[in-house]
Amino acid sequence: MTGFVELLQEDKVLPIALGVGIVITSAIIYHLYFSNKKSKSSKGDGKKLVLLQDPQVKYSIPLIDKDVVSHDTRRFRFGLPSKEHVLGLPVGQHIHLSAKIGDELIIRSYTPVSSDDDHGYVDLVIKVYFKNVHPKFPDGGKMSQHLESLKLGDTIDIRGPSGRLNYLGDGQFSVKKLRKDPPQLIKVSKVGMIAGGTGITPMLQLIRHIVKDPSDTTQLALLFANQTEKDILVRRELEDVANKHPEQFKLWYTLDTPPTDWKYSTGFINDAMIKDHLFPPSSDTLIVMCGPPPMINFACLPSLDRLGYNKDLNFAY
């Protein structure tokens, strides 16, 4: 349900403590790469230095750290032009990474797990689809394997912001139905989220932004689908948010292949899961989804339709 189809998408998640030696190495690479470069990314005196000034321009940024999150998941930290820079990515938006791999230009979209509260770097958590792991995809993921091969100091091209959804705060969203459509303003008090596999990263971005703002009372509920328990990305962080904000954020899982002591749901996203663990249909509820296309098209959308959710208040990344 949520695994192999992601090879076609190759989406992104959680900072891990760094050893002293790695920190020193990263600092040296950061300094060498950006030394003698003048910043051209200021939006004005007294404002943040922002990397992503123009969504059509590619910016080259160096890998300054890499952590092993699991056997097939990595956290990549890329340096920005200075320690004062932020990426400049609105909440709800994503970036594009591009690289020449062999004779082919490969472009993939990712949502960082860092935010503009973080200065000097951008963090991406990415599942690496290795060769010869699944017979249907013998070559694995081109971009994820390329990122895995990068050494500290190697660069990647980044472009953005991109996306049809932008969270403005206090339950307000700017949403485009199609890329070229004018944005529409949507105001809700509840957001139901359905994520599959690495589709959790845009949800994490939104969750983090909302719960850190005491004035934002938007209610959140997440239904998170994975193949196995070990595939659940950012589980510790999600459960930490749920424990700290139990009145604002509800969390539920479903697995294709659960362990014997599993206390959550089993199987594909269905009507009952949505009814039991997300908010009921209303003009005050937005549903956002991110995951493999079969999950969205053959599980989520038909269930939402049967349950009476307003199609104008459903959004799929």
Image: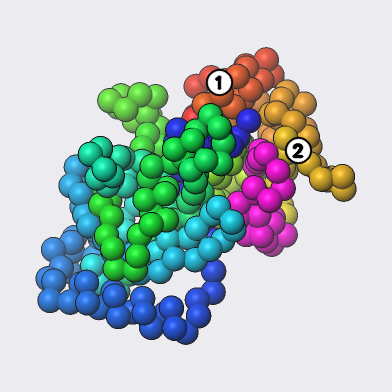
Residue 208 shown left or right of residue 149 in the figure:
right
Q: Which residue is mark 2?
A: 257
Q: Earlier in the sequence, mark 2 or mark 1?
A: 2
Q: Which mark is residue 200?
A: none
Of residues 139 and 16, the one nearer the viewer is 139
Residue 308 seen in the current view: no
Q: Amino acid at mark 1?
A: Asn
Q: Is the N terminus in the top left, top right, bottom left or bottom right quadrant?
A: top right
**In x, y percent, where is residue 238?**
64, 55
Specify the quadrant of the image occupied by residue 304: top right
In the image, what residue occupies the spot 55% across and 52% down? 72
Residue 141 seen in the current view: yes
Q: Amino acid at mark 2?
A: Thr
Badge 2, how many Cα within 10 Å: few under 14, some, many 20+?
few
Q: Which residue is mark 1?
A: 297
In the image, what residue occupies the spot 87% across and 45% down? 260
Of residues 19 and 34, the one nearer the viewer is 19
**In x, y percent, where is residue 97?**
31, 47
Residue 84 shown left or right of residue 259 in the figure:
left
Please name the colour scheme applied to the rendered image: rainbow
Of residues 164 and 27, the one nearer the viewer is 27
Q: Secondary structure at mark 2?
A: loop
Which region is colored magenta? 222-245
In the image, what residue occupies the spot 29% across and 75% down? 29
Count the numbered circles shown.
2
**In x, y percent, where is residue 5?**
53, 31
The image shows residue 224, relative to residue 157, as above or below, that is above
Q: Secondary structure at mark 1?
A: helix
Whether 232 is among the magenta residues is yes
The image shows residue 107, relative to residue 294, as above or below, that is below
Whether 173 is among the magenta residues is no
Residue 41 shown left or right of residue 27 in the figure:
left
